[in-house]
Protein backbone atom coordinates (compact mmCIF):
# COMPACT_ATOMS: atom_id res chain seq x y z
CA UNK A 1 0.00 0.00 0.00
CA UNK A 2 1.12 3.51 -0.81
CA UNK A 3 2.39 6.16 1.61
CA UNK A 4 1.87 9.85 0.94
CA UNK A 5 4.42 12.18 2.54
CA UNK A 6 4.12 15.96 2.67
CA UNK A 7 7.17 17.79 3.92
CA UNK A 8 10.29 19.74 3.13
CA UNK A 9 12.62 19.08 0.21
CA UNK A 10 15.76 20.97 1.07
CA UNK A 11 19.46 21.39 0.46
CA UNK A 12 21.57 20.80 3.55
CA UNK A 13 25.10 21.88 4.34
CA UNK A 14 26.35 19.92 7.30
CA UNK A 15 29.55 19.85 9.30
CA UNK A 16 30.28 17.03 11.75
CA UNK A 17 33.48 16.02 13.57
CA UNK A 18 34.00 13.56 10.69
CA UNK A 19 33.66 15.78 7.64
CA UNK A 20 31.44 18.20 5.81
CA UNK A 21 28.96 18.16 2.96
CA UNK A 22 27.60 21.11 1.00
CA UNK A 23 24.21 21.48 -0.64
CA UNK A 24 23.24 17.83 -0.38
CA UNK A 25 19.70 16.45 -0.49
CA UNK A 26 17.93 17.07 2.78
CA UNK A 27 14.55 17.88 4.25
CA UNK A 28 11.99 15.69 5.98
CA UNK A 29 10.25 14.47 2.82
CA UNK A 30 13.52 13.37 1.20
CA UNK A 31 14.68 11.38 4.23
CA UNK A 32 11.23 9.88 4.74
CA UNK A 33 10.91 8.87 1.08
CA UNK A 34 14.44 7.45 0.84
CA UNK A 35 13.67 5.30 3.86
CA UNK A 36 10.05 4.24 3.24
CA UNK A 37 10.70 3.43 -0.42
CA UNK A 38 12.63 0.34 0.70
CA UNK A 39 9.36 -1.05 1.94
CA UNK A 40 6.50 0.42 -0.08
CA UNK A 41 5.65 2.87 -2.90
CA UNK A 42 5.87 6.52 -1.84
CA UNK A 43 4.09 9.63 -3.12
CA UNK A 44 5.87 12.87 -2.30
CA UNK A 45 4.42 16.37 -2.04
CA UNK A 46 6.72 19.33 -1.52
CA UNK A 47 8.21 22.40 -3.13
CA UNK A 48 11.64 23.34 -4.45
CA UNK A 49 13.03 26.48 -6.06
CA UNK A 50 14.44 26.94 -9.52
CA UNK A 51 17.94 26.24 -8.15
CA UNK A 52 17.19 22.67 -7.02
CA UNK A 53 19.28 19.86 -8.57
CA UNK A 54 16.21 17.91 -9.73
CA UNK A 55 18.35 15.28 -11.44
CA UNK A 56 19.60 14.17 -8.01
CA UNK A 57 16.04 13.20 -7.12
CA UNK A 58 16.13 10.61 -9.92
CA UNK A 59 17.67 8.19 -7.44
CA UNK A 60 14.47 8.45 -5.41
CA UNK A 61 12.24 8.16 -8.48
CA UNK A 62 14.16 5.02 -9.45
CA UNK A 63 13.30 3.58 -6.03
CA UNK A 64 9.56 4.05 -6.59
CA UNK A 65 9.05 7.55 -5.22
CA UNK A 66 6.38 9.31 -7.26
CA UNK A 67 7.42 12.96 -7.57
CA UNK A 68 4.24 14.15 -9.30
CA UNK A 69 3.46 16.26 -6.22
CA UNK A 70 6.81 18.04 -6.19
CA UNK A 71 6.17 21.61 -7.23
CA UNK A 72 8.93 23.82 -8.61
CA UNK A 73 8.34 27.48 -7.73
CA UNK A 74 10.07 30.69 -8.76
CA UNK A 75 12.75 31.44 -6.16
CA UNK A 76 15.33 29.76 -3.96
CA UNK A 77 15.05 26.30 -2.43
CA UNK A 78 14.89 25.73 1.34
CA UNK A 79 18.46 25.59 2.61
CA UNK A 80 19.70 24.58 6.05
CA UNK A 81 23.24 24.82 7.31
CA UNK A 82 24.13 23.14 10.57
CA UNK A 83 26.95 21.75 12.64
CA UNK A 84 27.31 18.91 15.10
CA UNK A 85 30.07 18.91 17.64
CA UNK A 86 31.19 15.84 19.57
CA UNK A 87 27.79 15.54 21.20
CA UNK A 88 26.08 14.27 18.08
CA UNK A 89 22.69 14.43 19.76
CA UNK A 90 22.09 18.13 19.10
CA UNK A 91 22.50 20.14 15.93
CA UNK A 92 23.58 23.75 15.97
CA UNK A 93 21.71 25.61 13.23
CA UNK A 94 23.99 28.10 11.51
CA UNK A 95 21.64 29.28 8.76
CA UNK A 96 18.09 28.64 7.63
CA UNK A 97 16.77 30.08 4.37
CA UNK A 98 13.17 29.07 3.83
CA UNK A 99 13.01 30.40 0.26
CA UNK A 100 9.98 29.10 -1.66
CA UNK A 101 9.12 26.89 1.31
CA UNK A 102 7.82 29.94 3.19
CA UNK A 103 4.93 30.28 0.73
CA UNK A 104 4.32 26.53 0.36
CA UNK A 105 0.65 25.49 0.12
CA UNK A 106 0.52 21.74 -0.38
CA UNK A 107 -1.57 20.68 -3.38
CA UNK A 108 -2.25 16.97 -3.34
CA UNK A 109 -2.48 15.64 -6.91
CA UNK A 110 -5.79 13.87 -7.63
CA UNK A 111 -4.05 10.50 -8.00
CA UNK A 112 -2.47 10.85 -4.51
CA UNK A 113 -5.68 11.59 -2.61
CA UNK A 114 -6.59 8.01 -1.86
CA UNK A 115 -3.26 7.08 -0.31
CA UNK A 116 -4.08 4.72 2.58
CA UNK A 117 -1.11 5.89 4.67
CA UNK A 118 -0.27 9.59 5.14
CA UNK A 119 2.74 11.14 6.86
CA UNK A 120 2.49 14.85 7.60
CA UNK A 121 6.15 15.66 8.13
CA UNK A 122 7.25 18.65 10.17
CA UNK A 123 5.58 21.67 8.50
CA UNK A 124 3.18 24.38 9.71
CA UNK A 125 0.20 22.65 11.40
CA UNK A 126 -2.08 24.88 9.28
CA UNK A 127 -0.67 23.21 6.18
CA UNK A 128 -0.87 19.77 7.78
CA UNK A 129 -4.59 20.45 8.35
CA UNK A 130 -4.95 21.60 4.72
CA UNK A 131 -3.54 18.28 3.56
CA UNK A 132 -6.14 16.43 5.62
CA UNK A 133 -8.86 18.42 3.81
CA UNK A 134 -7.56 17.08 0.51
CA UNK A 135 -7.14 13.37 1.24
CA UNK A 136 -9.88 10.73 1.39
CA UNK A 137 -10.23 8.41 4.38
CA UNK A 138 -6.67 7.19 4.87
CA UNK A 139 -6.25 4.11 7.06
CA UNK A 140 -3.56 5.84 9.11
CA UNK A 141 -2.51 9.48 9.39
CA UNK A 142 0.70 10.27 11.26
CA UNK A 143 2.29 13.63 11.88
CA UNK A 144 5.53 15.07 13.18
CA UNK A 145 6.13 18.57 14.54
CA UNK A 146 8.83 20.74 16.13
CA UNK A 147 9.45 23.30 18.88
CA UNK A 148 8.77 26.26 16.55
CA UNK A 149 5.18 25.14 15.82
CA UNK A 150 4.53 24.10 19.42
CA UNK A 151 5.27 27.67 20.38
CA UNK A 152 3.73 29.58 17.50
CA UNK A 153 0.82 27.37 16.35
CA UNK A 154 -0.44 25.72 19.49
CA UNK A 155 -4.20 25.92 18.75
CA UNK A 156 -3.74 24.54 15.23
CA UNK A 157 -1.46 21.81 16.54
CA UNK A 158 -4.08 20.76 19.10
CA UNK A 159 -6.69 20.71 16.32
CA UNK A 160 -4.36 18.51 14.30
CA UNK A 161 -3.82 16.14 17.25
CA UNK A 162 -7.55 15.47 17.35
CA UNK A 163 -7.41 14.39 13.70
CA UNK A 164 -4.34 12.14 13.48
CA UNK A 165 -3.92 8.51 14.49
CA UNK A 166 -0.31 8.81 15.48
CA UNK A 167 2.27 11.47 16.28
CA UNK A 168 6.04 11.23 16.35
CA UNK A 169 7.96 13.84 18.28
CA UNK A 170 11.18 13.97 20.21
CA UNK A 171 11.46 13.99 24.00
CA UNK A 172 12.15 17.72 24.23
CA UNK A 173 9.16 18.51 22.02
CA UNK A 174 6.91 16.19 24.04
CA UNK A 175 7.95 17.97 27.23
CA UNK A 176 7.43 21.39 25.63
CA UNK A 177 4.01 20.51 24.19
CA UNK A 178 2.68 19.02 27.43
CA UNK A 179 4.61 21.16 29.93
CA UNK A 180 5.48 17.92 31.72
CA UNK A 181 8.97 16.60 32.30
CA UNK A 182 7.99 12.95 32.83
CA UNK A 183 7.60 11.24 29.44
CA UNK A 184 4.98 8.72 30.59
CA UNK A 185 2.78 11.58 31.79
CA UNK A 186 3.56 13.57 28.63
CA UNK A 187 2.43 10.62 26.50
CA UNK A 188 -0.82 10.31 28.46
CA UNK A 189 -1.47 14.02 27.95
CA UNK A 190 -1.11 13.63 24.19
CA UNK A 191 -3.11 10.37 24.04
CA UNK A 192 -5.98 12.19 25.77
CA UNK A 193 -6.06 14.69 22.89
CA UNK A 194 -6.60 12.34 19.99
CA UNK A 195 -3.79 10.13 18.72
CA UNK A 196 -4.08 6.41 19.50
CA UNK A 197 -0.31 6.09 19.32
CA UNK A 198 2.38 8.46 20.53
CA UNK A 199 5.98 7.83 19.53
CA UNK A 200 8.53 9.74 21.59
CA UNK A 201 11.97 9.69 19.97
CA UNK A 202 15.05 10.08 22.17
CA UNK A 203 17.74 10.11 19.47
CA UNK A 204 20.66 7.89 20.45
CA UNK A 205 18.61 6.72 23.46
CA UNK A 206 15.90 4.99 21.42
CA UNK A 207 12.17 5.57 21.13
CA UNK A 208 8.98 4.81 23.05
CA UNK A 209 5.60 3.98 21.57
CA UNK A 210 2.72 4.63 23.94
CA UNK A 211 -0.92 3.65 23.58
CA UNK A 212 -3.57 3.95 26.28
CA UNK A 213 -2.97 0.31 27.21
CA UNK A 214 0.68 -0.37 26.50
CA UNK A 215 4.20 0.91 26.14
CA UNK A 216 6.91 -0.41 23.85
CA UNK A 217 10.54 0.62 23.78
CA UNK A 218 12.92 0.30 20.84
CA UNK A 219 16.58 1.05 21.54
CA UNK A 220 18.77 2.91 19.10
CA UNK A 221 21.26 0.61 17.43
CA UNK A 222 24.65 0.89 19.15
CA UNK A 223 26.72 2.11 16.21
CA UNK A 224 30.46 2.43 16.39
CA UNK A 225 30.47 5.31 13.93
CA UNK A 226 27.67 7.85 13.80
CA UNK A 227 28.59 10.03 10.89
CA UNK A 228 25.76 12.57 10.58
CA UNK A 229 22.55 12.44 12.67
CA UNK A 230 20.60 14.70 10.27
CA UNK A 231 17.39 13.06 9.10
CA UNK A 232 17.41 10.17 11.56
CA UNK A 233 13.92 11.02 12.85
CA UNK A 234 12.35 11.24 9.39
CA UNK A 235 14.13 8.06 8.32
CA UNK A 236 12.70 6.42 11.44
CA UNK A 237 9.21 7.58 10.44
CA UNK A 238 9.80 6.28 6.90
CA UNK A 239 10.75 2.84 8.17
CA UNK A 240 7.89 2.78 10.66
CA UNK A 241 5.10 3.83 8.30
CA UNK A 242 6.70 2.08 5.34
CA UNK A 243 6.49 -1.22 7.23
CA UNK A 244 2.85 -0.64 8.19
CA UNK A 245 1.97 0.21 4.58
CA UNK A 246 3.86 -2.80 3.25
CA UNK A 247 2.04 -5.20 5.56
CA UNK A 248 -1.30 -3.39 5.92
CA UNK A 249 -1.40 -4.75 9.47
CA UNK A 250 -2.21 -2.28 12.26
CA UNK A 251 -2.11 -4.78 15.15
CA UNK A 252 -0.10 -3.88 18.25
CA UNK A 253 2.31 -6.70 17.43
CA UNK A 254 2.95 -5.28 13.97
CA UNK A 255 3.29 -1.72 15.25
CA UNK A 256 6.06 -3.00 17.53
CA UNK A 257 7.77 -4.57 14.54
CA UNK A 258 7.32 -1.27 12.68
CA UNK A 259 9.14 0.52 15.53
CA UNK A 260 12.12 -1.75 14.90
CA UNK A 261 12.01 -1.12 11.15
CA UNK A 262 11.96 2.58 11.97
CA UNK A 263 14.92 2.22 14.32
CA UNK A 264 16.80 0.19 11.70
CA UNK A 265 16.26 2.84 9.00
CA UNK A 266 17.27 5.60 11.42
CA UNK A 267 20.45 3.70 12.21
CA UNK A 268 21.34 3.46 8.53
CA UNK A 269 20.56 7.13 7.87
CA UNK A 270 23.23 8.34 10.30
CA UNK A 271 26.02 6.25 8.73
CA UNK A 272 26.59 8.76 5.91
CA UNK A 273 25.77 12.33 4.93
CA UNK A 274 22.36 13.07 3.41
CA UNK A 275 20.42 10.08 2.07
CA UNK A 276 23.64 8.43 0.85
CA UNK A 277 23.46 5.31 2.99
CA UNK A 278 19.69 4.94 2.53
CA UNK A 279 20.21 4.79 -1.24
CA UNK A 280 22.86 2.12 -0.99
CA UNK A 281 21.42 -0.45 1.44
CA UNK A 282 19.60 -3.58 0.28
CA UNK A 283 16.60 -5.39 1.70
CA UNK A 284 19.06 -8.00 3.07
CA UNK A 285 20.85 -5.25 5.02
CA UNK A 286 17.53 -4.17 6.52
CA UNK A 287 16.46 -7.71 7.44
CA UNK A 288 19.86 -8.36 9.02
CA UNK A 289 19.69 -5.22 11.13
CA UNK A 290 16.15 -5.98 12.29
CA UNK A 291 17.44 -9.38 13.48
CA UNK A 292 20.35 -7.66 15.24
CA UNK A 293 17.83 -5.48 17.08
CA UNK A 294 16.05 -8.63 18.16
CA UNK A 295 19.27 -10.08 19.54
CA UNK A 296 20.09 -6.75 21.23
CA UNK A 297 17.05 -6.84 23.52
CA UNK A 298 16.15 -10.54 23.73
CA UNK A 299 16.00 -12.28 27.06
CA UNK A 300 13.90 -14.97 28.67
CA UNK A 301 11.91 -13.62 31.59
CA UNK A 302 11.58 -17.07 33.16
CA UNK A 303 14.38 -19.49 33.99
CA UNK A 304 14.39 -22.28 31.47
CA UNK A 305 11.58 -20.42 29.70
CA UNK B 1 25.27 -18.48 46.77
CA UNK B 2 26.49 -15.56 48.84
CA UNK B 3 27.51 -12.11 47.60
CA UNK B 4 30.13 -10.06 49.39
CA UNK B 5 29.85 -6.28 48.97
CA UNK B 6 32.46 -3.77 50.07
CA UNK B 7 31.43 -0.14 49.88
CA UNK B 8 30.16 2.93 51.64
CA UNK B 9 27.59 2.97 54.44
CA UNK B 10 26.47 6.56 54.64
CA UNK B 11 23.82 8.99 55.79
CA UNK B 12 22.21 10.92 52.96
CA UNK B 13 20.28 14.16 53.00
CA UNK B 14 18.46 14.55 49.73
CA UNK B 15 16.21 17.16 48.20
CA UNK B 16 14.18 16.45 45.08
CA UNK B 17 11.31 18.36 43.42
CA UNK B 18 9.01 16.00 45.37
CA UNK B 19 10.28 16.35 48.92
CA UNK B 20 13.28 16.06 51.17
CA UNK B 21 14.80 13.52 53.53
CA UNK B 22 17.47 14.09 56.17
CA UNK B 23 20.09 11.66 57.42
CA UNK B 24 18.57 8.58 55.84
CA UNK B 25 20.42 5.34 55.07
CA UNK B 26 22.59 5.75 52.00
CA UNK B 27 25.87 4.66 50.48
CA UNK B 28 26.66 2.09 47.83
CA UNK B 29 26.83 -0.92 50.18
CA UNK B 30 23.43 -0.16 51.72
CA UNK B 31 21.67 0.17 48.36
CA UNK B 32 23.43 -2.88 46.97
CA UNK B 33 22.58 -5.00 50.02
CA UNK B 34 18.95 -3.88 50.21
CA UNK B 35 18.58 -4.86 46.56
CA UNK B 36 20.61 -8.09 46.37
CA UNK B 37 19.14 -9.48 49.60
CA UNK B 38 15.85 -10.06 47.75
CA UNK B 39 17.66 -12.68 45.73
CA UNK B 40 20.53 -14.12 47.77
CA UNK B 41 22.37 -13.86 51.13
CA UNK B 42 24.62 -10.80 51.36
CA UNK B 43 27.77 -10.16 53.38
CA UNK B 44 28.54 -6.48 53.91
CA UNK B 45 31.91 -4.85 54.65
CA UNK B 46 32.09 -1.14 55.43
CA UNK B 47 32.66 1.43 58.13
CA UNK B 48 30.45 3.81 60.08
CA UNK B 49 31.16 6.35 62.81
CA UNK B 50 29.94 6.43 66.36
CA UNK B 51 27.00 8.59 65.28
CA UNK B 52 25.46 5.99 62.95
CA UNK B 53 21.89 4.80 63.70
CA UNK B 54 22.87 1.13 63.77
CA UNK B 55 19.35 0.05 64.76
CA UNK B 56 18.13 1.19 61.35
CA UNK B 57 20.36 -1.45 59.76
CA UNK B 58 18.32 -4.13 61.53
CA UNK B 59 15.92 -4.04 58.59
CA UNK B 60 18.80 -5.21 56.39
CA UNK B 61 19.93 -7.83 58.88
CA UNK B 62 16.37 -9.15 58.98
CA UNK B 63 16.56 -9.57 55.20
CA UNK B 64 19.63 -11.78 55.44
CA UNK B 65 22.41 -9.19 55.23
CA UNK B 66 25.32 -10.31 57.42
CA UNK B 67 26.76 -7.18 59.05
CA UNK B 68 29.74 -8.93 60.68
CA UNK B 69 32.06 -6.92 58.43
CA UNK B 70 30.61 -3.54 59.39
CA UNK B 71 33.22 -1.77 61.47
CA UNK B 72 32.33 1.07 63.80
CA UNK B 73 35.19 3.55 64.13
CA UNK B 74 35.73 6.57 66.34
CA UNK B 75 34.48 9.65 64.51
CA UNK B 76 31.71 10.80 62.20
CA UNK B 77 29.94 8.71 59.58
CA UNK B 78 30.17 9.44 55.85
CA UNK B 79 27.50 12.02 55.05
CA UNK B 80 26.34 13.22 51.66
CA UNK B 81 23.93 16.02 50.97
CA UNK B 82 22.58 16.48 47.47
CA UNK B 83 19.82 17.96 45.43
CA UNK B 84 18.06 17.00 42.22
CA UNK B 85 16.27 19.60 40.17
CA UNK B 86 13.75 18.79 37.47
CA UNK B 87 16.38 16.98 35.46
CA UNK B 88 16.48 13.96 37.74
CA UNK B 89 19.39 12.48 35.82
CA UNK B 90 22.09 14.49 37.58
CA UNK B 91 22.62 15.12 41.28
CA UNK B 92 24.06 18.34 42.58
CA UNK B 93 26.33 17.59 45.52
CA UNK B 94 25.95 20.21 48.22
CA UNK B 95 28.15 18.65 50.91
CA UNK B 96 30.33 15.58 51.34
CA UNK B 97 31.84 14.70 54.70
CA UNK B 98 33.91 11.53 54.43
CA UNK B 99 34.42 11.20 58.18
CA UNK B 100 35.69 7.74 59.19
CA UNK B 101 35.34 6.62 55.57
CA UNK B 102 38.49 8.59 54.69
CA UNK B 103 40.61 6.16 56.75
CA UNK B 104 38.68 3.02 55.76
CA UNK B 105 40.81 -0.07 55.17
CA UNK B 106 38.50 -2.98 54.41
CA UNK B 107 39.07 -6.02 56.60
CA UNK B 108 37.25 -9.06 55.27
CA UNK B 109 36.14 -11.33 58.13
CA UNK B 110 37.46 -14.90 57.82
CA UNK B 111 33.98 -16.29 57.26
CA UNK B 112 33.42 -13.88 54.28
CA UNK B 113 36.60 -14.76 52.38
CA UNK B 114 35.16 -17.60 50.37
CA UNK B 115 32.19 -15.64 49.02
CA UNK B 116 31.69 -16.86 45.43
CA UNK B 117 30.41 -13.46 44.24
CA UNK B 118 32.13 -10.18 45.11
CA UNK B 119 31.02 -6.64 44.38
CA UNK B 120 33.63 -3.93 44.89
CA UNK B 121 31.39 -0.88 45.10
CA UNK B 122 32.69 2.59 44.33
CA UNK B 123 35.65 3.11 46.69
CA UNK B 124 39.35 3.90 46.17
CA UNK B 125 40.77 1.37 43.66
CA UNK B 126 43.66 0.80 46.09
CA UNK B 127 41.14 -0.52 48.60
CA UNK B 128 39.33 -2.53 45.94
CA UNK B 129 42.68 -4.21 45.20
CA UNK B 130 43.23 -4.82 48.93
CA UNK B 131 39.91 -6.66 49.08
CA UNK B 132 41.02 -8.92 46.23
CA UNK B 133 44.12 -9.84 48.25
CA UNK B 134 41.88 -11.05 51.05
CA UNK B 135 39.30 -13.15 49.18
CA UNK B 136 39.78 -16.67 47.84
CA UNK B 137 38.97 -17.52 44.23
CA UNK B 138 35.51 -16.00 43.83
CA UNK B 139 33.54 -17.17 40.78
CA UNK B 140 32.82 -13.58 39.79
CA UNK B 141 34.32 -10.27 40.85
CA UNK B 142 32.59 -7.08 39.74
CA UNK B 143 33.55 -3.49 40.46
CA UNK B 144 32.13 -0.02 40.11
CA UNK B 145 34.04 3.26 40.07
CA UNK B 146 33.54 7.03 39.62
CA UNK B 147 35.00 10.13 38.00
CA UNK B 148 37.10 11.01 41.07
CA UNK B 149 39.06 7.72 40.94
CA UNK B 150 39.35 7.76 37.16
CA UNK B 151 41.14 11.06 37.53
CA UNK B 152 43.18 10.49 40.68
CA UNK B 153 43.88 6.71 40.68
CA UNK B 154 44.19 5.78 37.02
CA UNK B 155 47.14 3.33 37.35
CA UNK B 156 45.46 1.47 40.23
CA UNK B 157 42.16 1.43 38.38
CA UNK B 158 43.82 -0.11 35.31
CA UNK B 159 45.45 -2.70 37.58
CA UNK B 160 42.02 -3.46 39.01
CA UNK B 161 40.49 -3.80 35.53
CA UNK B 162 42.94 -6.59 34.78
CA UNK B 163 41.71 -8.47 37.84
CA UNK B 164 37.90 -8.19 37.67
CA UNK B 165 35.43 -10.16 35.58
CA UNK B 166 32.96 -7.33 35.19
CA UNK B 167 32.76 -3.57 35.63
CA UNK B 168 29.72 -1.35 35.93
CA UNK B 169 30.13 2.34 35.24
CA UNK B 170 27.97 5.10 33.86
CA UNK B 171 28.24 6.55 30.37
CA UNK B 172 30.09 9.69 31.47
CA UNK B 173 32.60 7.63 33.44
CA UNK B 174 33.12 5.25 30.51
CA UNK B 175 33.86 8.21 28.24
CA UNK B 176 36.20 9.75 30.81
CA UNK B 177 38.08 6.51 31.44
CA UNK B 178 38.55 5.69 27.76
CA UNK B 179 38.75 9.24 26.37
CA UNK B 180 36.27 8.11 23.71
CA UNK B 181 32.83 9.59 23.15
CA UNK B 182 31.36 6.57 21.34
CA UNK B 183 30.14 4.00 23.89
CA UNK B 184 30.71 0.95 21.65
CA UNK B 185 34.35 1.98 21.22
CA UNK B 186 34.63 2.82 24.93
CA UNK B 187 33.37 -0.67 25.82
CA UNK B 188 35.90 -2.28 23.47
CA UNK B 189 38.68 -0.27 25.09
CA UNK B 190 37.69 -1.55 28.54
CA UNK B 191 37.16 -5.15 27.35
CA UNK B 192 40.71 -5.13 25.99
CA UNK B 193 41.99 -4.37 29.51
CA UNK B 194 40.57 -7.32 31.38
CA UNK B 195 36.86 -7.53 32.18
CA UNK B 196 34.88 -10.06 30.18
CA UNK B 197 31.73 -7.97 30.69
CA UNK B 198 31.30 -4.21 30.66
CA UNK B 199 28.02 -2.72 31.82
CA UNK B 200 27.51 0.91 30.85
CA UNK B 201 24.64 2.50 32.77
CA UNK B 202 22.80 5.44 31.22
CA UNK B 203 20.42 6.25 34.08
CA UNK B 204 16.90 6.86 32.78
CA UNK B 205 18.10 5.76 29.33
CA UNK B 206 18.86 2.17 30.34
CA UNK B 207 22.05 0.12 30.33
CA UNK B 208 24.26 -1.78 27.89
CA UNK B 209 26.14 -4.98 28.60
CA UNK B 210 29.06 -5.55 26.25
CA UNK B 211 31.19 -8.65 25.82
CA UNK B 212 33.76 -9.23 23.07
CA UNK B 213 31.12 -11.10 21.07
CA UNK B 214 27.81 -9.51 21.95
CA UNK B 215 25.87 -6.51 23.13
CA UNK B 216 22.67 -6.48 25.16
CA UNK B 217 20.50 -3.52 26.02
CA UNK B 218 18.12 -3.22 28.96
CA UNK B 219 15.86 -0.15 29.00
CA UNK B 220 15.04 1.73 32.16
CA UNK B 221 11.47 1.12 33.26
CA UNK B 222 9.26 4.02 32.15
CA UNK B 223 8.08 5.20 35.57
CA UNK B 224 5.44 7.85 35.96
CA UNK B 225 6.96 9.05 39.22
CA UNK B 226 10.67 9.04 39.83
CA UNK B 227 10.97 10.20 43.38
CA UNK B 228 14.70 10.09 44.16
CA UNK B 229 17.33 8.66 41.78
CA UNK B 230 19.96 8.23 44.53
CA UNK B 231 21.25 4.67 44.70
CA UNK B 232 19.73 3.47 41.43
CA UNK B 233 23.11 2.29 40.09
CA UNK B 234 24.01 0.31 43.21
CA UNK B 235 20.51 -1.16 43.37
CA UNK B 236 20.97 -2.17 39.73
CA UNK B 237 24.25 -3.88 40.64
CA UNK B 238 22.55 -5.61 43.58
CA UNK B 239 19.80 -7.01 41.37
CA UNK B 240 22.28 -8.03 38.68
CA UNK B 241 24.79 -9.82 40.89
CA UNK B 242 22.10 -11.03 43.28
CA UNK B 243 20.42 -12.84 40.39
CA UNK B 244 23.71 -14.41 39.25
CA UNK B 245 24.45 -15.56 42.80
CA UNK B 246 20.95 -16.94 43.26
CA UNK B 247 21.15 -19.00 40.08
CA UNK B 248 24.90 -19.71 39.94
CA UNK B 249 24.57 -19.56 36.16
CA UNK B 250 27.08 -17.40 34.28
CA UNK B 251 25.80 -18.13 30.77
CA UNK B 252 25.18 -15.21 28.39
CA UNK B 253 21.46 -15.96 28.52
CA UNK B 254 21.42 -15.70 32.30
CA UNK B 255 23.56 -12.56 32.33
CA UNK B 256 20.90 -10.95 30.12
CA UNK B 257 18.23 -11.96 32.59
CA UNK B 258 20.42 -10.57 35.38
CA UNK B 259 20.51 -7.21 33.52
CA UNK B 260 16.71 -7.14 33.72
CA UNK B 261 16.72 -8.02 37.43
CA UNK B 262 19.20 -5.17 37.88
CA UNK B 263 16.99 -2.78 35.93
CA UNK B 264 13.94 -3.89 37.91
CA UNK B 265 15.68 -3.28 41.26
CA UNK B 266 16.96 0.11 40.04
CA UNK B 267 13.42 1.04 39.05
CA UNK B 268 12.11 0.21 42.53
CA UNK B 269 14.93 2.08 44.26
CA UNK B 270 13.95 5.41 42.71
CA UNK B 271 10.30 5.18 43.81
CA UNK B 272 11.07 6.39 47.36
CA UNK B 273 13.83 8.06 49.34
CA UNK B 274 16.73 5.93 50.62
CA UNK B 275 16.18 2.17 50.64
CA UNK B 276 12.52 2.61 51.62
CA UNK B 277 10.96 1.01 48.58
CA UNK B 278 13.57 -1.77 48.42
CA UNK B 279 12.61 -2.80 51.95
CA UNK B 280 8.93 -2.92 51.15
CA UNK B 281 8.72 -4.84 47.86
CA UNK B 282 8.01 -8.56 47.67
CA UNK B 283 9.35 -11.27 45.40
CA UNK B 284 6.00 -11.09 43.55
CA UNK B 285 6.58 -7.37 42.85
CA UNK B 286 9.99 -8.21 41.40
CA UNK B 287 8.72 -11.06 39.24
CA UNK B 288 5.90 -8.87 37.96
CA UNK B 289 8.25 -6.07 37.01
CA UNK B 290 10.64 -8.44 35.24
CA UNK B 291 7.67 -9.62 33.17
CA UNK B 292 6.74 -6.01 32.43
CA UNK B 293 10.27 -5.44 31.14
CA UNK B 294 9.79 -8.41 28.86
CA UNK B 295 6.57 -6.97 27.48
CA UNK B 296 8.23 -3.54 27.12
CA UNK B 297 10.80 -4.73 24.57
CA UNK B 298 9.20 -7.83 23.04
CA UNK B 299 8.64 -8.05 19.32
CA UNK B 300 8.75 -10.73 16.67
CA UNK B 301 11.49 -10.07 14.12
CA UNK B 302 9.77 -12.17 11.47
CA UNK B 303 6.21 -11.85 10.24
CA UNK B 304 4.16 -14.65 11.70
CA UNK B 305 7.27 -15.66 13.69
Image (cartoon, coloured by chain):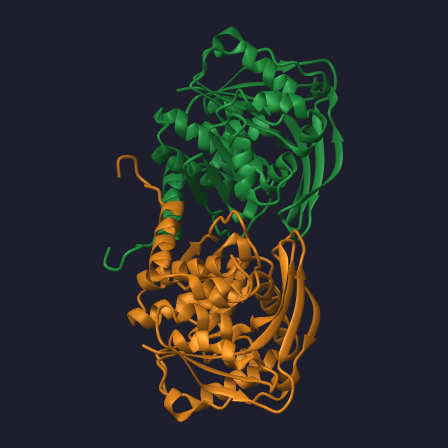
Chain colours: A orange, B green
Residue appearing at x 58%, y 39% in the figure: B170
Camera-nearest residue between B80 and A226: A226
Camera-nearest residue between A205 and A50: A50
Eyeballing the image, is B55 above or below A75? above
| Location of residue A217 in the rendering, given as x and y in whole percent from the top left corner | 44, 55
**Can the viewer see residue B8?**
no
**Can the viewer see residue A93?**
yes
| Location of residue B165 in the rendering, given as x and y in whole percent from the top left corner | 48, 24
Given the current orientation, which residue lies at the most extreme front position? A55
Query: In the visual, does A97 lie left or right of A177?
Result: right
Given the current orientation, which residue lies at the most extreme top position? B110
Given the current orientation, which residue lies at the most extreme left position? B304
Residue appearing at x 70%, y 43% in the figure: B83
| Location of residue A4 in the rendering, given as x and y in whole percent from the top left corner | 42, 80
Eyeballing the image, is B174 above or below A218? above
Query: In the visual, does B230 lie left or right of A54?
Result: right
The image quarter in which residue A154 lies: bottom right
| Location of residue A49 in the rendering, given as x and y in whole percent from the top left corner | 60, 86
Amino acid sequence: MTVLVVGSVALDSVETPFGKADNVLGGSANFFAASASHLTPVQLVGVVGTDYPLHELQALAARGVDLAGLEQAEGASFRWRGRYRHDLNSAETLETHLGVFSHFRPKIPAQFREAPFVFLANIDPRLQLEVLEQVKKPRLVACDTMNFWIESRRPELLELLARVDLITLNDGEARQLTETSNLVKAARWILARGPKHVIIKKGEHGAFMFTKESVFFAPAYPLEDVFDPTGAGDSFAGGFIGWLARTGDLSEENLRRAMIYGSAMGSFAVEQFSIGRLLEITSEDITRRVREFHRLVSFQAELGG
